[in-house]
Image (cartoon, coloured by chain):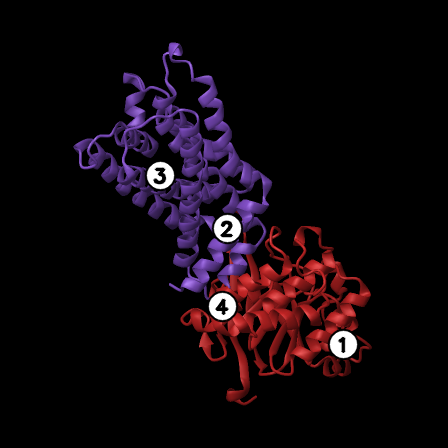
Chain colours: A red, B purple
Amino acid sequence: MERDNIAIEVRNLKKYFKNKFETVKAVDGISFNIKNGELFGFLGPNGAGKTTTINILSGLLKPTEGTALIGGNDVLKELNKVKALIGICPQEPAIFKFLNARENIELFGNLYSMPKEKIKERTQNLLKKLDLLEASKRKTKGYSGGMIRRLNLIIALINDPKIAFLDEPTVGMDPRARRSTWEFIRDLKNDKTIILTTHYIEEAEAICDRVAIIDYGKLIEIGSPKELMEKYEAENLEKVFMKITGRRIMEGM
Amino acid sequence: MEAQRIIALIKMELKKLIREPAYLFLMLLFPAVLTLTFGLAFSDPSLGMSFDFMVPGLFAYACIFIIMTIAQSFTDNRAAGLLKRMNTTPMTSGEFMGSHIISNMIIAIFQVLIVFILSILMGFSHNADAVGILLAFLVIALLSLSSVGLGLITASISKNSGTATGLSFIFILPQMFFGTFIPVTNSTRLIAMFLPSYYVTDALKSIFNGDSLLSANILIDFAFISIVSIIIVIIGIQLFKKFGNK
């Protein structure tokens, strides 16, 4: 992989949480590169270390050890440059319930210091693409779970980030909404690098260029879904995971 | 510091005030109800406590409850993941805290305006001139600063909004009982001397009494409130940055 073409470079990343009784190795020495314009999936059961990795890459958590470069910027030393490059869609939707969708999106646009016109234009486009335009002036208190998920995704993209971290963006969506969200995410990768965490096998297979399979904080396999299925002579990624770990992804939940 | 971010955050806070009924009641309707109630209850001089004596305390009283709303707001936002999410944007902690301080100062000014207008309508008489009234508003703005600081301290040590509400009364009750309109005795003066609201009420009494704005009493009160409020808000910000944003 040419260095110029690397969006994210992670080296020996570790995050340990200590309590009175034990040290939990949430991320245990993982290393990988993600190319510009790639749709990269983190696949693994709940508690595997996917969200912790994203939290480190977005500067929310400090690693115990290791380095991470985002667009060539060190997350520990150049966090402000990193923040300007990224957008985060957290696993638990974080929105202000007393604001309507448009106000929520515009607030975050302002926090990125975007020009007013640009905020309005992007808000309108994103609301339209994710089918929230009609409800955009309604307070979000009355939104369904799927609508809140879509709004959560829009806020992550308002600053037109070069690199977007989407942490379980389709959890709780009905199958139709999930498929249309996949389409939307696929379209995004035309000009963005997308890092998607998921425990849905079909999601990883359907939209990711490459996946990293994570379990107990360790990166146990990396490659395109097709490569991995061929390597392990498995018909899907679930079986790949089973062949490596001896259990199903959903068992870890 | 970027004005665009601070203005957006202030607007958001003020929208919350208007749209959340609990906040609207506590911040704007409560001071109004309190003034009307006390105005009616103490309109008879034979009771020994005049309404004119109570108004400076009412000014401070309303503003003290900012401690609770700040503590609730920060713990709620933390629980909803909003603080984390905002931390992933280029917004600085100075802009975030600054916007909270400014929006609560605006709210405090509104509270005082409501109390002042209603008090006048209920017969409150004072000897302050226009500059004196402006100074009274400034003193209250400074008290709101200490209330924001105490709210942040409460939020830092509270795991959730319910705990924050309860714990905020550690700071609210002493200020209410020993630093507003309840007469201070020799035994309670020792506690009152450490409370910002005591100095605020004392300064307001002097201002409304028509004392010279450069009198030693007003200047000492003003200096105490300024220094203590700044210290409290700095402690609050540092504690919240260290323990409250996790």
Residue under circle 2? B13
Amino acid at the residue labelled 2? Glu
Give the alpha-carbon distance from disc 2 to disc 3, as whole Å. 19 Å
Q: Which residue is at the front of the view, B59 or A221?
A: B59
Give the alpha-carbon distance from disc 1 to disc 3, as whole Å. 60 Å
Amino acid at the residue labelled 3? Ile
Give the vertical position of A171 relative to B44 (above or below). Answer: below
Residue at disc 1, secondary structure: helix
Give the alpha-carbon distance from disc 4 to disc 2, as whole Å. 18 Å
Residue under circle 1? A206
Q: Earlier in the sequence, mark 1 or mark 4?
A: 4
Q: Residue at x 41, y 63 (%)?
A: B3
Residue A115, numbered label = none
Quadrant position of the N terminus of chain A in the picture: bottom right
Give the vertical position of B213 relative to A204 (above or below). Answer: above
Q: Residues within 10 Å of mark 3 (few under 14, many from 20)?
A: many
Residue under circle 3? B140
Residue A112, numbered label = 4
Labels 4 and 2 touching (C-beta < 8 A): no
Give the alpha-carbon distance from disc 1 to disc 2, as whole Å. 41 Å
